[in-house]
Structure formats: structure tokens, C-alpha cells
Amino acid sequence: MESRLASLVIEGLKRAHVRFVVGLPDSMLAGVYVAAEKDPDIRYVAVTNEAEGASVAAGTWITGGRSVLVMENSGLRAACEALARLGLVNGVPVTMLMGYRGDLGERFHWGVNHGMTMEPILKALRIPYWIIDREEQIVPAIGRAVVHGISSLYHTAVVFRTPLVDEGK
Amino acid sequence: MKRYELLKQLARLVTAEDLVVTSIGGVKPEWYSLMPSNGTMFADLLGCATPFALGVALNLPHRRVVALDTDGGVLFNLGALCTVGKELPPNLTIIVLDNERYEGVVGGPPTHTSGRVDLERIAEGSGIPCTATVREIENFFESATKMLSDGQVGLLVAKIEPGLFKDIPPERAKESDGIEDKYRFMRHIEKLEKISIRPRYALE
């Protein structure tokens, strides 16, 4: 059965007329990838790293196919160069949805560094973001991130933090 | 085979209905001088021509899309070939301009394709059904013609000589930056597809 989180994310994407979900799987948003792949109105494109994903998402977006890139927040580091070039040089937006791995209370040692670097990188790249932790924020956050991408022609991000997302095992 | 000669042949095959995505490097000013229309996205990122073009091809499956990539660009992001091989967009053709070096870098240091690395075989192993490597201009035209019309995704490695074409007429010189390139391409798509991508007011 689809999780409540995944259902709300899909609802938010549809309301924002997003047709492409480009993703590299992670545990926190695990249900979202599955739901996107199953949904007949959404094309899910699995990629091999987040930099590649940013480019695929940019290619659909600039030709009228609204897209989001779904990933773990460590993907932000992998995608930095692509995001910097696409955003700062070409002005083609990528809207990102990511789980907040390394948030205060992180149980895994390997995840702590993700939390330490996420917000400084978002700020360094001047990417507006909204960290959400309640279900009622999901649909409006996705909508606002997509709209802001269109008006600013620059990247945006929605970060899902616990208890909204499962930290995984 | 020189890149400019190859691009001249390609310009004969690409129509106003087609879309092209270029990599960074010497291909940009040369292709612009031959094809100054707005149907080309001059992406400014090493390794993004193929994945960017994949996004274009998936979104506009009724249009032929050409990725003008390079050896350095493909090597930078090899996983993109695997994604292409998984998605198999029939309207995408990837042309890899392989001069076996990082030409934009002082001294033109070699890329891995100057040794035993074979991009065609990597593409084949990634699941791309139609692949070829060409060294002569006649073979390029023949292979590119076939790949652009066979209705399946293809990757063509074109082994080219290093060197930038130096005699581009001033009126055909590319002077735009990445932002202008983006607007030109986006507005071109809006007109071509009769859609609105970036309206004056973005509505939720």
C-alpha cells in the first residue's frame, strides 16, 4: 500500500503539473520513487547519479515538461557542479525534493555529514528551500517550489525532515 | 576528419523541426556559425549534453533530438549512457566528437579515448542498440543519415582531428552567453510546440 507521504507528494506533483520525476533512490523518500514509477501520469526516470539527474530534469523542464529531482540530501553534493552551471550560467531551474539525512537525532554515523553540509551548500548556491516536517506542508511546499522555479528560473528545494520521513534502517 | 567539416555535413541533415543540445568546447562556436537558428541548446556543462538531450527527447518524443557530445563530456558522466540504454528514446541520436583530448585545456592533454577506452563498446554494453565509430567524413554522413532516420536511439563516435576552425565570419560568430542561449531555445520551443513554458505570471 502506498504510504501517506508518497500519496501527498504525488498529489503535490500533480497539482503543480509535474510530469517527470527524475530520481536516485534513497531510504527516506523510498515510497515516493515507487509511487512515481507506478503512476500513469508521471514518467519516472531513474538515473545513476544526481548530477546526471539534474541535467535530465533540466532537459525536460526547458522544453515544457515540468520535472523534479528526488534524492537523498547527499545528492546535493554530487550534483553541485551541474546545479551551478545549469542555474548560474544557463538559468534553467531544477526543483529538488530530498530527505533530511543527518538532521539532529541522526542514528547513523554515515548520515551525520549529510546534515552538516546540506544547508551550507543550498545557501552557497543561493537555492531557496523549505524544510518541512508536517503532512499539511507537503502539497503547498511542492507547489511553491515549482512555481518559484518558473518565476526565478533558478533551482528550488523542499527538504523532508523527521517525523515526516522515516530514517530507514 | 575535421570537426567543422563534420558539422557542415550534419547541418545538411538537421532540419528546423529538430532539436540539438551541445556540449562545451569548440563545437559551440562552430555549430552556431553553421546553424544559427534557435533550435540548439548550448548547454554550458561538461557531461550534460547527453543527459540534457535525453530529457528533451523524453519530453518531446515526436521530435528528433541530437546530442552533440564530446569524448571528455561522455567520460565525465558515463552513467548517462546507461540511463539512455535503459530509457531507449527512439528519437535521440548521440554524436560523440572524439578528438581524444581536452582541447580547451592548455597543451590539449589526452583523454582516456586516446588509449584503449572504446566509447562505442561502452555504449553497446549500456544497451544502446545502434552504435558505430567513423573516421572518414563520407562514413560519418552515411552513419548519421541512418541513425537520424532509423527510429531508434543511436550513438555515433566520430574520431576527429584536434583543432578549432579559425575562419568563422564575424557575422556568424557566437556572442551570446548562457542566459541568452537559454531564452532563445526556450522561446523557440514555445513557438514550435505552441506551449507556454515560462509565462509572465507563474500560477500554481
Image: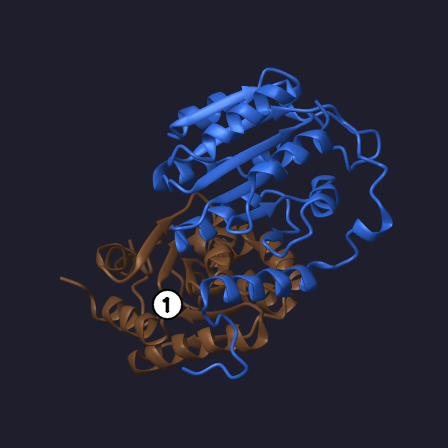
Work out which quarter of the rendered image holds the C terminus of chain B and state it.
bottom left
Residue at numbered disc 1: A18
Q: Is residue A110 above or below residue B50?
A: below
Q: Quadrant of residue A3?
A: bottom left
Q: How many marks?
A: 1
Q: Where is residue B138 in the image (x, y as percent from the top left)?
A: 61, 20
Q: Colour of chain B?
A: blue
Give the image location of residue A8, x and y in percent.
27, 73
- Kind of residue indicated by mark 1: Val
Taking the spot 40% from the left edge, 78% from the top edge, the residue there is A143
Which residue is located at x 46 percent, y 25 percent?
A: B131
- The answer, for residue A100, to whether it is visible in the render is no
Give the side of residue A33 with respect to residue A59, left or right. Answer: left
Q: Chain A: what color?
A: brown
Residue B18's place in the image compared with B96, above or below, is below
Quadrant of the image containing the N terminus of chain B: top right
Q: x%, y% of residue B43?
A: 63, 51
Q: Which of B179 and B145 is in front in this view?
A: B145
